[in-house]
């Protein structure tokens, strides 16, 4: 009966209504998550600019953790949704169980790294002992206690894959709100709590993740009737793990490339001044408020595309993609307007010094021009993943960030002008758009046309 309800929703409901119903809860939760990212850095900036710089330098490792947890979830999500679409209940259950196993294994890796490698990581980027001390305090706690994040991400993906995105809105929203509330309390020592500084910011983060993870587990066991997570007689399956990572590894690598890009940009920018690195970190926090809703759109779109791919319904897939691109571009246009008109206001939230304003205002205006086409590129990459062509997404991300963006930023830095460096972002996004269109053309020939022929034969 649950399987029939899933078929009726994912395979029959009007596409626009389905996409909105799937994506809207995720967009709301992602907006709350983006708000947390901004508020978190706002409170850290009240400690001092070096503390803000430390958080900026820590971003590549935090992004790597998110990449591995999210990318693995993408693989599980795609395999689980396809299994449900093809009426393969055993395959769906096994995908879910192996996904949880992989989440636990991923945490153990970062537990070890958090205990051993934080100091070395920061020393490769700066020789400021103050920034290194702030960074070690913050990142070591985030890594060693990251089990909440890995569990949260995986169990949320299981909810998304079965169309229960409303529950992920509650988990992500609750985790973010707890983090926002605890940040000032633990950082500055309010209501009888000790003043913990940077450690307080990290502890607030992991507590929010742990609570959200526990909620996601409860929601799955109580409401997710489309899969069984009973661990009796469970054994990891090499075949299923390989299937998960055939989609997940490109996604992991794609997001990990972002970590390499940020690390490289930090190295380029800190040669000008540590303030430039802080500005870059602030930009990433601010742009998350624009990009996170689009990632929410992705999370709602991917199960629809994957399910209808398994059910051989190409027209529904195409309509879903077109609508997702339209909504994404509308969000990006709003972001462009905000970044162009009010960069000074945005920077002032982060206790910006006069030097930060001088560097930051042209930076935000210049980088935001890349928003014009970024929405199309993001939706395209998620489409490739949902259709089992994650290598296309990887190629786009690799080309944009490592082949174009970093070399362009380095060459522009040779001019001696920090303002010139920011133009690397629009340049890279144009290259990403061109590659996305080429791969979309290939997907149409290799997947959509054969699917339509199969559909016609079955009719």
Image (tube, rainbow, N blue to C red):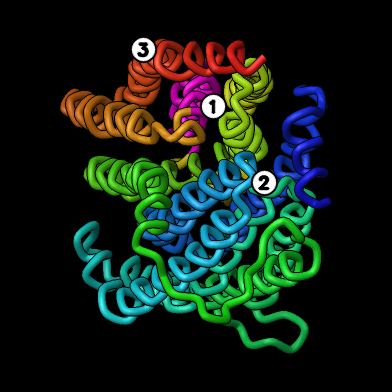
**CA distance separating discs 1 and 3:** 14 Å
Q: Residue furthest front?
A: 458
Q: Is residue 57 left or right of residue 160?
A: left
State which region is magenta.
357-383
Q: Is residue 347 magenta?
A: no
Q: Could you tell me which quadrant the C terminus lies in?
A: top right
Q: Secondary structure at mark 2?
A: helix
Q: Looking at the picture, how far across and down is residue 341, in whole percent?
A: 63, 21
Residue that label 3 marks: 438
Is residue 374 covered in magenta?
yes
**411 with respect to 261 (left or right):** left
Q: Earlier in the sequence, mark 3 or mark 2?
A: 2
Query: Label 2 near label 3: C-beta < 8 Å?
Result: no
* Label 3 crowd bin: few (<14), some (14–19), many (20+), radius 10 Å: few
Taking the image as drawn, is residue 26 in sight? yes
Q: What percent of the width, then of the height, locates residue 362?
A: 45, 25
The CA span between labels 3 and 2 is 30 Å
Q: Disc 1 designates what residue?
A: 379
Q: Which residue is mark 2?
A: 30
Tag 2–tag 1 contact (CB < 8 Å): no
């Amino acid at each position: 009966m649950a399987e029939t309800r899933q078929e009726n929703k994912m395979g029959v409901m009007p596409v626009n209504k389905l996409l909105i119903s799937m994506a809207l809860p995720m967009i709301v939760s992602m907006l709350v998550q983006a708000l947390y990212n901004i508020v978190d850095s706002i409170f850290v900036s009240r400690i001092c600019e070096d503390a803000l710089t430390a958080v900026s330098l820590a971003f590549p490792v935090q992004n790597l953790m998110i990449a591995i947890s999210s990318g693995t979830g993408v693989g599980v999500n795609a395999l689980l949704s396809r299994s449900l679409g093809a009426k393969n209940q055993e395959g769906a259950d096994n995908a879910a169980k192996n996904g949880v196993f992989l989440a636990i294994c991923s945490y153990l890796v970062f537990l070890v790294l958090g205990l051993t490698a934080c100091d070395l990581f920061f020393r490769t980027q700066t020789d400021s002992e103050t920034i290194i001390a702030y960074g070690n305090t913050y990142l070591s706690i985030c890594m060693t206690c990251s089990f909440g994040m890995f569990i949260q991400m995986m169990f949320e993906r299981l909810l998304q894959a079965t169309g229960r995105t409303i529950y992920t809105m509650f988990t992500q929203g609750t985790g973010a709100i707890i983090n926002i509330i605890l940040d000032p309390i633990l950082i500055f020592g309010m209501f009888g709590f000790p003043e913990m500084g940077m450690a307080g910011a990290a502890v607030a983060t992991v507590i929010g993740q742990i609570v959200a993870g526990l909620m996601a587990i409860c929601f799955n066991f109580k409401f997710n009737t489309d899969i069984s997570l009973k661990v009796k007689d469970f054994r990891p399956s090499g075949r299923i793990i390989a299937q998960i990572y055939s989609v997940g590894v490109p996604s992991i690598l794609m997001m990990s490339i972002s970590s390499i890009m940020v690390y490289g940009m930090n190295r380029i920018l800190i040669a000008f001044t540590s303030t430039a690195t802080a500005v870059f970190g602030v930009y990433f926090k601010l742009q998350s408020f624009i990009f996170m809703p689009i990632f929410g759109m992705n999370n709602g779109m991917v199960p629809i595309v994957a399910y209808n791919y398994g059910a051989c319904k190409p027209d529904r897939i195409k309509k879903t993609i077109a609508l997702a691109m339209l909504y994404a571009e509308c969000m990006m246009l709003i972001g462009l307007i905000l970044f162009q008109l009010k960069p000074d206001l945005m920077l002032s939230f982060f206790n910006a010094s006069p030097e930060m304003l001088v560097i930051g205002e042209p930076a935000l205006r210049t980088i935001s021009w890349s928003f014009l086409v970024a929405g199309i590129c993001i939706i395209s990459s998620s489409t490739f993943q949902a259709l089992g062509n994650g290598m296309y997404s990887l190629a786009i991300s690799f080309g944009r960030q490592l082949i174009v963006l970093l070399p362009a930023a380095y060459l522009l830095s040779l001019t001696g002008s920090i303002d010139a460096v920011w133009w690397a972002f629009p340049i890279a996004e144009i290259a990403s758009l061109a590659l996305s269109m080429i791969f979309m053309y290939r997907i149409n020939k290799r997947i959509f046309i054969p699917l339509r022929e199969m559909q016609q034969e079955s009719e």
